[in-house]
Image (cartoon, rainbow, N blue to C red):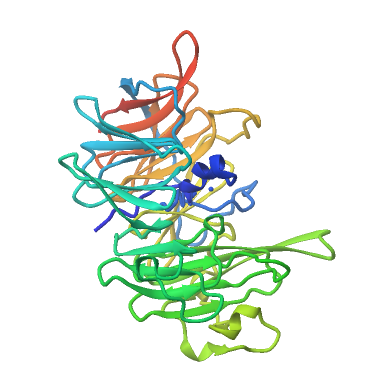
Amino acid sequence: MFSPHLISNRFPWRAAWIRTGTTIVATLLATTSLVLHAAGAPSIPTPTSDTAPSSGSRMLNTRSQPVPLQSLGMLGTTSESVQADFSPTGERFARRNDKEIELWQTSPLKRLVRVGASSWTAIHQMLFSANGQLHYIDYDRHHWITPDLQQGTGIKMSLLSPDGRHALRIAPRDGEDGFEPIYYGANSDVYDLQEKRSVCQFPHIDLLSGPVFANGWFAVQLASVGPRSPQPLAVCELATGRAVLMPFGGASRLYPTLDPQGRWLMVHASGTRFLGLSNWSERKVFALPLAQHAFSHNPDNQPYACVHLPCGNPDPSPMANQLPQFAPFMSPDGSWLVFRGSESLQIFRNPHMAQVAKLPHAAFKDPSADAKTGHYRIVFSANSRFMGLQVNNHLYRLDLQGQPLQLQEMAPPVADFNLQAISSDGLHWLVQHKTGPQQTFQGALWRGNP
């Protein structure tokens, strides 16, 4: 099994496309990211004030004594990484930008492997498997580094699912790795790597549309081609190969979030009204699997793609009515949903989406447009036990198994930094900050106490 933790902020792989003319959590997604997603939240409007805690939630203070962090060393490069992740055990970590990927040993700190991208390509996804194997995609080709540091190369793909079973292939040529379009206009598919077959086929898909995998599901907004805009959301049930489309009226952007355990699909839709003079947004949650009776072929007044695939609008679930309207940060196992505010976090627990705590933190102030540090970042450990939070130059750790839930403030060794990852034991942190006489922007490994 692969760790679904790409990065907490949604779609982190998007950042690596700057070099190729595109730009995430994920970065994702990143960040996102989701962190990429992921492992994090899509780029929708950030709340400017905190929502009052719902019934049954608690406003809790942070623990008073900050925990000091010490630097274990700089990572010896001036290349700014767009993603950093620990292996599930925390014994290793990896960093990437669009030009190279590095695999490191945590203790003693030592770089094990550095791999450069092809001269005209970019590395845009990276994840660890449960056994510590590192996987990455160099533009459109799957590569891996085994625990004993052997390197391998697989088929062409654009995105690998968190469990390693499925791949997204964008615009493969007819016959390439067995791709055969099943209807006119199908030029992207979800591919089963074990059974070596196409599971679902869709019209044009773009990585910037934020495709997401979860346990048994795939979702993405179809890319706009020509005047046929806006485009619907495409959903694939991986076990059955059932592919459907969900139009969202005049929504120009759709941001799907899939529960890592395959229980629900959350969609944030946004667009404009009155000739672009007014913005609108909405959030809907749909229980999975989607109701079959809600979909039909080529319904009236629906996008052209509905000629080939069933289209419909299933009834949204009321289970998320109590959630804030903006997109959540989600733990890799899907147990926790975190919503940010200007001065606090709201913590919700799956599967009932009940708010369990509201945790105050230092007030966030938007950094300058050209600032490399001092941002707002949320990251989760690969095992979903710990969460790291950066609010400008404040750093916090949250033990999600602690009772009660409390933010523990940390004392970083430098004031200006960027948080990238936290290990599964909650002790090690990956960051970036300026250092040396030339004030170069470098990665660093920090360690704190339990």
* Left/right of residue 294 with respect to residue 225 in the rendered view: left
Looking at the picture, how far across and down is residue 241, in whole percent?
A: 38, 79
Residue 269 locus on image (x, y percent)? 63, 65
Nearer the observer, 338 or 361? 338
Q: Quadrant of residue 282?
A: bottom right
Picture residue at 45% right of the left edge, 56% below the top: 57
The residue shown at (34%, 38%) is 422
In the picture, residue 161 is in which quadrant? bottom left
- Find residue 315 and report its image quarter: bottom right
Residue 281 at x, y = what percent?
67, 63
Residue found at the far left of this picture: 148
Rendering coords of residue 187 (x, y %): 51, 70
> Is residue 358 among the parts visible in the rendering?
no
Q: Is residue 94 above or below residue 442?
A: below
Determine whether 390 is above or below 312 in the image: above
Left/right of residue 145 with respect to residue 45 in the rendered view: left
Residue found 52% across the figure and 56% down from its top: 207
Q: Residue sitting at 57 percent across and 67 percent down?
A: 222
Is residue 79 among what the camera can see? yes
State whether residue 127 is above or below residue 377. below
Total tally of numbered discs in the picture: 0
